[in-house]
Amino acid sequence: MKPLNDLTLEQKVGQLLMCGFHSQHADEQITRLIRDYHVGGVIYFRRNVESVDQLTRLSAELQEMAAEAGALPLMISVDQEGGMVARIDQEGMTQVPGNMALGATGNAEYTLECAQILGRELKSIGIDMNLAPVVDVNNNPLNPVIGVRSYGEHAESVAAHGVAAITGYQSQGIAATAKHFPGHGDTAVDSHLGMVTVPHDRNRLEQMELLPFRKAIEAGVDAIMTAHVMFPSIEPEPIPATLSHKVLTGLLREEMGFEGIIITDCLEMHAISKPYGVAEAAVRAVEAGADLILVSHTLQDQVAALEAIVEGVRTGRISEEVIHQAVERIMTWKKKRCGQQNDHLVSPKASETVEATDVEPVDCTKPTEPNELTLFKIASSSITIVHNDGLLPLDPEKGVYVIWPEVVQRTEVDEPWSHTESLGMALSQLRGRVREHKITTQPTYDETDRILADVSDSEQVIVCTYTSAGHLPKGQQFLVEKLSKNHSLIVIALRNPYDLLEISRPGSYVCTYENTPAVVRVLSHVLTGGLQPTGSLPVRLR
C-alpha cells in the first residue's frame, strides 16, 4: 500500500468516493472510475448480482484492476441488512432475518449469530463492508423508509441489537456501518424523495435517536452513515445532517468521540441532489466532516463529485489537511479490513457480548443445515400473534382460502425475492383443501370483486397484507374491509405491523415482519397448531 504522502491530490480524492455501476461485470463505468479517477470504494446492488460465484469473480476482477492501476485496495460494500433489504439473495447467501423480526425475539444473541453468518459469507465473496446495521429507532408508524429495517421503537433494545450486529460483522472481518446518523426513525417522509426534519429538542434526541449511536461507538463500530435529515436543535441552519459541520464534526467527531469512517448516504437521493446538486453536495459533505462520499448510480454525477472536491482543494475552499485526515482514516481501515481471510478470525461466543435467552430448536420443522436451524429458531421466536379470537389454530376439517400479495415492484427498500414461497404453498404441505388467490400489492376494485365472488363459500379466510411504505395501500384496505363484512378474518401482516392501524380489527392478527421462505414455512406450522410462536411486538400499535 502506497504511503499517503506519495499519493497525488487526485488519488487522495479518489479514495473519498464510493461508487456503484450497472453491470454484472467490470463495465466501462467502473473501469473508468478505478483506472482514470482512482476511486477507492465500490458498492454492489441487485443489478450487479447474477450468482454468488459470479460476484466472487467480479470482486476479484475489480481488486485486480485496482492493483494494475497502482491504486490502493478497493473498499467493496453492499446493503445486506437482512429481511426485506438484501442485495444478494441468490443460492449460497443465507437469507438472515431483518431487524424488526430480530427485535421481536427479544434476544440479541440471535442478532449476533445472524451477523456472524452473514459476515462470513460476505467476506468469502470479496466484500469488506456491510452498510448495516440500521440503528434508527422507528417510533413513527408513518415512516415510509425505515419501518421493519429498525429493531423497534425502544432505544435501549435497538442499541443492544445494534451492538450485537456490529460485534458479529466485525468479528468476521467485515466493517459494520451504523446508520442513519443522527436518526431517521421518527420521520414521515422518505429522504430518497424529499427533505425531512426531526424537530425534537436535544434532551429527547439524547434519550432516543442518539443512544444507539453512542453504544455503537463504544462497541468500536468501523463506520457511521449520515442521514439526509435536518435536526434544528443541533444545526439551526436549514441543512441536512450530511452537510452539517455542527452535526458531523461538532457532534459526532468532537462530542461523541467517533474516530472511524463517516460515510454519507447516497448523494443522488432527492433530499440532497434536488436542492444542492451532487457535485456541490460532495464538497459540502467533505467540509462538514465526511470521509467517504457515496454516489451510487450515475457516472456523470460521480465524476462531477470527484472533480468538484479536487477543485475545492485547489481553490482553497477545502483544506488539503481535511483530505489528508480523511484518507488517513480510510487507509487505516483498509489495512485493518481489506484482504482478511476468515480462517484466522475470532468468532466470540454470543454470551460473552450480549445477554441471551435460550430457545429450544423447532422440532416440527426438522431443518438439517446449521444456518437453516438458526433461521427456523428465529422465525418461531419472532412471529407475533397480536390477538386471536378463537380462529387459530386452523380447523383441519374446514377448507382454507388464502389471499397472498406478490411483491413485484422494486424500490430502494423493497425488492422482490428471486426465490419465494407463498403461504398457500406452505399450508398445502400440512393441510388439504387450501385455495390461494394471488394479488398485487396494489389490488384494483375489479380484483376485489373477483375475490369476493370466489371466496363466498370459504369457511376459513386468511388475508395477507404487505406494504413497505407508511400506509397500507388503499386497494388492500378496501379488500380487507369488504371481506370482513361476511367473514371472520385472519389477517397476517407480512411486513409492516402497523397495517392493523388502517383496517377494522380482524378476528386474528399476526405479524411476521418479512415474507422470507423460512418465515412462511414456520408461519404455516403456527397457523395449523404445530408451533406456538413467542414473538412480542417491538412497536406499539396505537
Image (cartoon, rainbow, N blue to C red):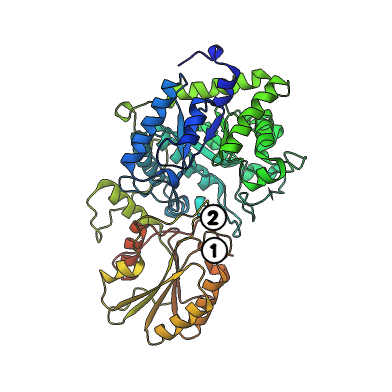
Q: Is residue 271 visible?
A: yes
Residue 147 numbered mark, or none:
2
Q: State whether residue 471 is above or below residue 45.
A: below
Dot 1 alpha-carbon crowd within 10 angstroms: few under 14, some 14 to 19, many 20 or more: many
Q: What residue sits 59% from the left and 28% below the top? A: 291
Q: Is residue 125 visible?
A: no
Task: Name which quarter of the figure residue 406 lies in.
Answer: bottom left
Residue 313 in the figure: left or right of residue 385: right
| Image position, residue 243 (x, y; %) | 68, 36
Observer-nearest of 300 and 79 = 300
Which secondary structure, mark 2?
helix
Q: State whether residue 10 is above or below residue 371.
A: above
**Number of disc labels:** 2
Which secondary structure, mark 1?
helix
Give the labeled residue for mark 1. Answer: 498
Q: Are marks 1 and 2 in contact (CB under 8 Å)?
A: yes
The three-letter code of the residue at mark 2 reads: Gly
Extreme front residue here? 28
Q: What residue sits 59% from the left and 21% below the top? A: 10
Q: What residue sits 36% from the left and 53% below the top? A: 378
Observer-nearest of 66 and 369 = 66
Q: What residue sits 31% from the left and 48% below the top? A: 91
Q: State whether residue 107 is above or below residue 284.
A: below
| Image position, residue 152 (x, y; %) | 52, 52
The three-letter code of the residue at mark 1 reads: Tyr
| Image position, residue 155 (x, y; %) | 56, 47
Dot 2 alpha-carbon crowd within 10 angstroms: few under 14, some 14 to 19, many 20 or more: many
